[in-house]
Amino acid sequence: MGKAEAYLDEVLGAFDFGVPVVGAVRFGQGHINDTFVVHTQPEDRCCRRFILQRMSAAAFKRPDQLMENVIGVTEYLGREIERNGGDRDREALRVIRPRDGGAYYTDRDGGAWRLYPFVEDTVCCQAAETPELFAASGRAFGRFQRLLQSYPAQTLHETIPRFHDTEDRLAKLKAAVAADKLGRAAECRAEIDFMLAREKDCSAALQALRDGVLPLRVTHNDTKLNNVLMDKTTGEGVCIIDLDTVMPGLAINDFGDSIRFGANHSAEDETDLSRVNLDVGLFEVYTQAFLEGAGGTLTAAEIEYLPWGAKLMTLECGIRFLTDYLEGDVYFHISREKQNLDRCRTQCKLVSDMEDHWDELAAIVKKYC
């Protein structure tokens, strides 16, 4: 399939914008989907914009199931927001269907495209430059849990099967170590041993789910700061975006992925591990905000397991980086040699930091529950 630009005229004609289209240009910093901002020009008011995306066929094999999830969740969110007196068109995505009435448009070569209104007067931040910004994202993702607390999670499709199955991730690492097809295992023996020493940990949350201790919920599964649109004026989180990985899952994983991403000040591939440290202060800032946004939605067990969410999401990410390195860097894009190994090492350092501060993290969670 060629570059997405080759299909723009065809795709733009498949949607009814109601007004003339001025043009479409690439937008944002995402690496999975092809994203464009579409400009239109109504006669009686300012330019109206839309977000047009070609969904990645490599990452998502079933766009029909993905969009069934997205439409179900966004329509439910919209009803809940309206019921609570909010602004539905600003606080939740709305899927605009193509002229044929489907959930998305399929171009001449099988590419799947979707359209959303642009949420104006918001910004998308790539890093939590202030504690206030990190807290705002925590309130937004906590609110996401609260609004979707009654959504039947079991009806959602797994857009990426076994995405946060840490047991399966470790099994894949073991297979990669055994195969060692590139002869890389010897140089990362310390990292392999680090992961294998925490095999029991990999089952902690999944066993709690199997035992009924943790409930299955609607989860976002990619709770980075840049998946929250922030109000330009107030700095508060307005709308959760990038719903491709919305699936049944554990709320502690959504919490934990945010901590992995935001509660430290180093690059994900930092080579100087002395600069990689868990910021306990930011952990506290986010915990307080997430629980505030969740508004009593989480069970006592879920709250108790929040530190486990942080540890497991970090451990799992490290396992994935290490597995990819052993298999030849076939999944995560790299710009230099050993980048995935360096990424793995930063995750190991963060896990160690969490273990060193475990009692402190538990006390913080207890403080705000």
Image (cartoon, helix red, strand yellow):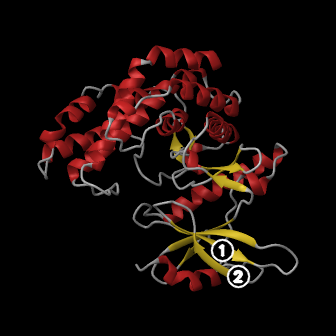
- Does 236 appear above or below 54? above
Which residue: 63% across, 40% down?
137
- Does 262 appear above or below 279? below
- Does 285 appear above or below 366? below
Nearer to the camera, 111 or 135: 135
Please tell me the numbered disc located at residue 367: none
SS at circle 1: strand
- In the rendered image, which residue does mark 1 sit on? 38
Which residue: 47% across, 31% down?
310
Q: Earlier in the sequence, mark 2 or mark 1?
A: 2
Q: Where, quadrant-wise, is the C terminus in this rendering? A: top right
Position of residue 296 in the picture relative to residue 83 (left or right): left
Determine the CA span between mark 2 and mark 1.
7 Å
Which residue: 70% across, 54% down?
122
- In the rendered image, which residue does mark 2 sit on? 21
Which residue: 59% across, 75% down?
25
- Does 210 appear above or below 234? above
Residue 91 in the image: state x and y as whole percent. Answer: 73, 51
- Circle 1 packing at 10 Å, graded few (<14), some (14-19), many (20+), is many
- Asked whether the viewer can see residue 65, the reply is yes
